[in-house]
Amino acid sequence: MSESDYRIIDSSSSQDKSSKSFSFSFTDINDWFISQQKISSKWKVIFFRLLATMVNAWIPILRAISILEKQEKDVILKKLYTNLVSGIKLWKNLSIWLRDYWGNFSDSECSIIESGEKTWKLNSALVQLADQTEKVAWISRKFKWALIYPAAIVSIMFAAIVLLMTMVVPKIVEMFWDKSKLPPLTQFLIFVSDFFINYLWLMLIFMFWFFVFIKLRYKTPDWKYRLDWILLKIPILWMINKKVILSKFARVFSNLLSSWISIVECLRIVSDVVWNEVYRQRLLLLREDVKKWVKIGESLEDDNLFPEMLVQMIKVWEETAKLDTIILKIADFYDDEVDQSVNNIQKLLEPFIIVTMSIVVWFIAVGIMQPIMWLADTLSEK
């Protein structure tokens, strides 16, 4: 074999290596993108329940996750199981590994799993987590629907008004020659129509930048506290907002307590679960009070953020050492309250929408019909 043949073999082997490294880099990028995809609450519930069933059947955790990996079709979950198997083979605890998985699992979920690992009650912890995730996800969906439904209705109403002012009113007004002699209501209607035609683009830009401004400011602690405080003061909406927060607080706090986690640590974890900054700061203050041996009921007494009924029930059950049980019942109570409040809002919105649209249509109809009737009277006199 000649020297040139060796060069050809060497160059081909180097090309193979470069192509392998190139394909490997693409695999890494693909894996990274898959890892960045958030795991939905629905799949979390399935994962917790299936794993709890296998652990309860005395199947080793490594084998249980391997079984889940083989039968899983979803790419995101399959990647989760693959990484779990690799981590457990390195003697890494399930709770520790889940904490590091791209923020998909909250501190409360990992703490409950960690407690289950330490107390040899992992199956109970997983079932408890599945119930908690399912309930919290349901209450969050209810709250989002309570926000989305009015926002969608207002958007539709605004779009209808824009359509009337930019397309319908100008066509009708064209039949009047001398607009200075029209009735005041009609002139005002023409003014509004001209404003929409000339400055609609400016209104849309302003609304867009307003929402961007609020979204960016919401990420800063001071503004987040102010905006969350405003949300707690908005009529009607504050009731649902408050009940959702109290439900989430009560359910997660109860599950953490039943997992034998200290109250001080429970309050720290719950303060991060509660998305409202006003409640978060109050729970951190409560944590400091508990550190000073102040009871929870005493610290929350006469606080507008926590209803008197909830505080009194906590006081009673603190004395009987069954705090986790009563708080879980409180969570169920507020779940039902949120469901009822959302249904009531939907029932109240329907007549409000009908009345509002009726007023708008009446305003436009009267503004257009007045000059037409005046014109008809003038022609009849002639």
Image: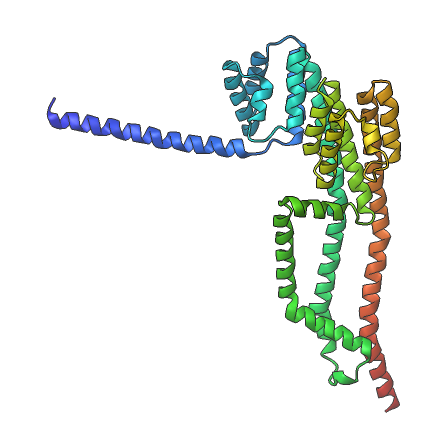
Q: Is residue 350 left or right of residue 287?
A: right
Reply above or below: 275 against 292.
below
Number of numbered discs: 0
Residue in the foreground of this view, choosing between 277 and 357: 277
Residue in the foreground of this view, choosing between 53 and 121: 121
Q: Position of residue 4 (x, y in %)?
A: 13, 28
Reply above or below: 17 against 208.
above
Residue in the foreground of this view, choosing between 299 and 312: 299
Q: Would residue 54 be seen by someone viewing this image from the given angle?
A: no
Quadrant in the rendering for residue 188: bottom right
Q: Is residue 326 left or right of residue 77?
A: right
Residue appearing at x 67%, y 45% in the figure: 224
Colouring:
rainbow
Reply above or below: 313 against 187.
above
Q: Would residue 351 be seen by someone viewing this image from the given angle?
A: yes
- In the rendered image, the residue lying farthest to the front is 292
Q: Position of residue 219 (x, y in %)?
A: 62, 45
Q: Position of residue 286 (x, y in %)?
A: 76, 31
Quadrant containing the C terminus in the rendered view: bottom right
Residue in the foreground of this view, choosing between 250 and 364: 250
Quadrant in the rendering for residue 301: top right
Q: Position of residue 71 (x, y in %)?
A: 57, 20
Quadrant containing the N terminus in the rendered view: top left
Residue appearing at x 55%, y 26% in the figure: 100
Residue appearing at x 84%, y 56% in the figure: 354
- In the rendered image, the residue lying farthest to the left is 2
- In the rendered image, the residue lying farthest to the bottom is 382
